Amino acid sequence: MQRMSFAAAAVLGLLAVVSPALADGGKMPRIISLTGHGEVRSTPDIAFVTTGVLSQGATAADALAANTKAMTDLFAALKDAGLEDKDIQTSNFTVQPRYDFSNGQAPKLVGYDVSNNVTVKLRKIDAMGALLDKLVQSGSNQITGISFDVSKPEEAMDQARKLATQDATRKAKLYAQAMGIELGNVMQVSEGSSAPPPAVPFVRGAAIMKADAAPVPVAAGEQTLAADVNVIWEIKQPQ
């Protein structure tokens, strides 16, 4: 079943509000409905890094043994960097055959690939560069993404909600003035949801970074926290 749209939910909510009046023989009230949007920018204080090892072998068992050894070293590096068990989570594990498609011949099985990835929650963003360097030196050849987030977004989200409400009210007053009508009481307020920003892509194939390189420079930037609100006003009847 598809998720109900923000606008459809607001209409159904309005019907629930006005249905008692209709049941009593009343008239459908005239309304104005506007959606407001609010955004607040905050500095991220946590980051998520997805890293791991891709290993190859003539057999699945060989590839798995090599990968297990490499991942053991990777876990040790994460622990050495101060990461706790609760902040390390396996995010992907695959075993796949590898074929040779060259010379226009039928595919020939030449080995197996084993990939194991973990997603790490880093609570100190300023340690990101050193961590990336340590991961590569420990044997990681897959660093597939970095994303940033705000650990306690409640205050910023509340501010975004206020801005969204102000935005909806501003537009409602503008429309009311343009149409020569007067806003009445608020009949309904419903909150929508804004999609979180996508993860910031970083490096695929971390082998491009040299083990003796300086710590990788990383910029966290700012995170946008957004809220949407739909407000329905009754239009005052002319005297």
Image (cartoon, grey):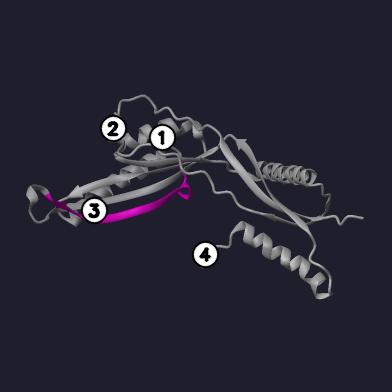
Q: Residue at x 73, y 44 (%)?
A: 171
* Side (left or right) of 44 relative to 234: left
Provide the residue designation for mark 1: 131
Percent across and percent down for residue 122 are 48, 40
Q: CA distance from mark 1 to mark 3?
A: 25 Å
Q: Point out residue 112 in the picture as x, y percentages from the top left corner.
A: 19, 53
The amino acid pointed to by label 1 is: Leu
Question: Which residue bears the numbered disc 4?
Answer: 2
Q: Is residue 175 magenta?
A: no
Pick whichever, 146 or 119, lies toward us. Answer: 146
Q: Earlier in the sequence, mark 1 or mark 2?
A: 1
Residue 188 shown left or right of residue 95 in the figure: right
> Which numbered marker is on residue 64?
3
Q: Separation of disc 3 and disc 4 at Cα?
A: 41 Å
Number of the label disc, if any, that sits on residue 203: none
**Magenta stretch prevailing secondary structure:** strand
- Image depth: mark 1 or mark 4 in front: 4
Query: What's the residue type where badge 2 is placed?
Result: Ile
Marks 3 and 2: which is nearer the front? 2
SS assignment at label 3: helix
Instruction: Give percent across and percent down for residue 175.
Output: 75, 45
Number of residues whose C-alpha sits closer than 10 Å to that of mark 1, classed few (under 14), some (14–19) or many (20 or more): many
The earlier-in-sequence mark between 1 and 4 is 4
* Residue occupying image coordinates x 47% and y 45%: 84
Secondary structure under the numbered disc 2 in the rendered image: helix
Q: Amino acid at mark 4?
A: Gln
| Badge 3 or badge 4: first in the primary sequence | 4
**Residue marked by disc 2:** 208
SS of the residue under disc 4: loop
The amino acid sitting under disc 3 is: Leu
| Bounds of the magenta segment | 83-101
User: What distance separates the C-alpha of mark 3 from that of mark 2?
Assistant: 24 Å
